[in-house]
Image: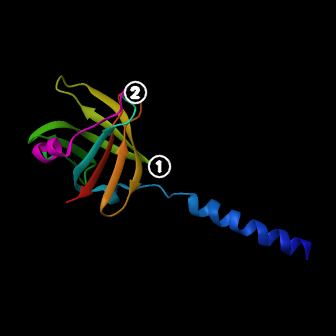
């Protein structure tokens, strides 16, 4: 009886533990065009947000393609392009720079649904982007 009572009290903890675990993301979930609707710089001093007016004018987006390439457009111009891979909740991005070199950094995915993604870069100059699928 004591065993059953303990099991009864521990069951909610096990359920919460398993429901809190997120599965990893996959490249298939990312493919397509995602329009930026919010861009924040939460670690800047003071914290900063790109205005809705600026986002409406610049029409920024990120597009993931099936060959694991991505492009980032801002103001109708190519802002960045390169290759990506997935590791857990990170989009590991290898950006192709104009001089032919590359640089690598992760985008950490905080949330991903079939309609919305929230991803961020870390560090003092990091940004958090909320985008919707087009």
Residue 25: x, y in percent? Answer: 42, 55
The residue positioned farthest toward the bottom in the image shown: 1
Image quarter in which the N terminus is found: bottom right
- Looking at this view, is 118 or 46 the one in front? 46
| Residue 131 falls left or right of residue 5 | left
In which image quadrant can residue 60 be found? top left
The residue positioned farthest toward the top in the image shown: 99
Does residue 32 lie above or below 128 as drawn? below
The residue positioned farthest toward the right in the image shown: 1
Specify start and end residues of the magenta stretch as a single range: 45-58
Residue 82 part of the magenta segment:
no
Image quarter in which the C terminus is found: bottom left
Q: How is the image coloured?
A: rainbow
Residue 42: x, y in percent? Answer: 38, 36
In which image quadrant can residue 31 be found? bottom left
Residue 105: x, y in percent? Answer: 36, 33
Label 1 sits on a secondary structure element that is: loop
Does residue 120 lie above or below 123 as drawn? below
Does residue 38 lie above or below 96 as drawn? below
Report the residue marked by disc 2. 124
Report the residue marked by disc 1. 88
Q: Looking at the rendered structure, which numbered label has been put on residue 6?
A: none
Label 2 sits on a secondary structure element that is: loop
Q: Is residue 85 in view?
A: yes
Q: Residue at x 27, y 52 (%)?
A: 131
Residue 64: x, y in percent? Answer: 25, 51
- Looking at this view, is 30 or 45 the one in front? 45
Q: Residue at x 40, y 54 (%)?
A: 111
| Front position among marks 2 and 1 | 2
- Looking at this view, is 8 or 100 the one in front? 8
Does residue 112 lie above or below 101 as drawn? below
């Amino acid at each position: 009886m004591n065993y059953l009572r303990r099991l009864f009290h521990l069951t909610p903890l096990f359920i919460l533990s398993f429901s809190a675990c997120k599965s990893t993301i996959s490249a298939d979930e990312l493919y397509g065009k995602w329009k930026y609707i919010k861009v924040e710089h939460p670690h800047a001093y003071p914290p900063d947000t790109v205005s809705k007016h600026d986002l409406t004018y610049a029409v920024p987006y990120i597009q993931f393609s099936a060959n694991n390439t991505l492009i980032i457009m801002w103001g109708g111009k190519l802002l960045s392009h390169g290759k990506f891979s997935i590791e857990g909740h990170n989009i590991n991005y290898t950006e192709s720079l104009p001089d032919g070199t590359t640089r690598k950094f992760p985008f950490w995915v905080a949330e991903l649904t079939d309609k919305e993604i929230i991803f961020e870069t870390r560090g003092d100059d990091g940004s958090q982007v909320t985008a919707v699928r087009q």
